Amino acid sequence: MKINTKKVVVSGMLVALAVSLSSFSIPIGASKCFPIQHLCNVIAGVFLGPVYGVGMAFCTSLIRNLMGTGSLLAFPGSMVGAYLCATLYQHTGKLIAAYIGEVFGTGVIGGILCYPVATMLMGKEAALFAYVIPFLMSTAGGTVMAIVLVTALRQSGAFDYLAGMLEEHA
């Protein structure tokens, strides 16, 4: 895989944005809901694709964990959401698919994947679907924020400019 320097830079900027705004979290149940991560997942999914989107989500989760502003539950939720968002957008070219991918990937699949992380790695007692509702609430908020931002980008013409600038050139 050829490395696209522009995508690496944008990924780094999204990581910096997500980490710097990590103090904006909403505690719901046993999880910290972090809508800015989901906003960044959608932006990465739409403009960067699955590889850079998952990389951005992983780096954000890792740094937040090292700083003490996140938990291990951030990994499965954010990474699956970023992957599904980017993959669906890449295959359909439709923004609604990206939004649905983020919500379903993080809220449902990521929420279910948190069960083994919580019980085996964190030593918490939890039901299989314990994290689905909190994750759905968090990702819904972040995805709505992303919809507002992407709509503004499309109306201003910046969306097409950014998409064109970040395309890989062979």
Image (tube, rainbow, N blue to C red):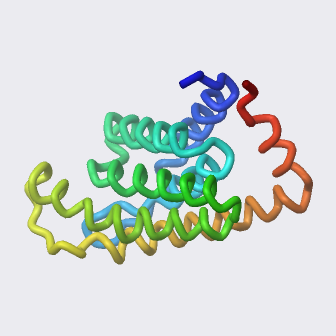
Image point (16%, 58%), residue name: 116
Outermost residue, right direction? Answer: 156
Q: Where 156 sits versus 3, above or below?
A: below
The N terminus is located in which quarter?
Answer: top right
Q: Where 154 sits versus 12, above or below?
A: below
- Which picture quadrant has residue 152? bottom right
Q: Where 122 sits versus 145, above or below?
A: above
The C terminus is located in which quarter?
Answer: top right
- Residue 47's x, y, as percent? 68, 46
- Residue 75's x, y, as percent? 34, 48
Q: Indicate left or right for 81 with 166 as reference.
A: left
- Which picture quadrant has residue 3? top right
Q: Indicate left or right for 72 with 12 as reference.
A: left
Front-lying residue, 47 or 33: 47
Image point (49%, 52%), residue name: 82
Q: Indicate left or right for 104 with 27 as reference.
A: right
Image point (26%, 60%), residue name: 113
- Residue 127's x, y, as percent? 15, 74
Image point (65%, 62%), residue name: 92
Q: Where 101 sits versus 157, above or below?
A: below
Front-lying residue, 10 or 92: 92
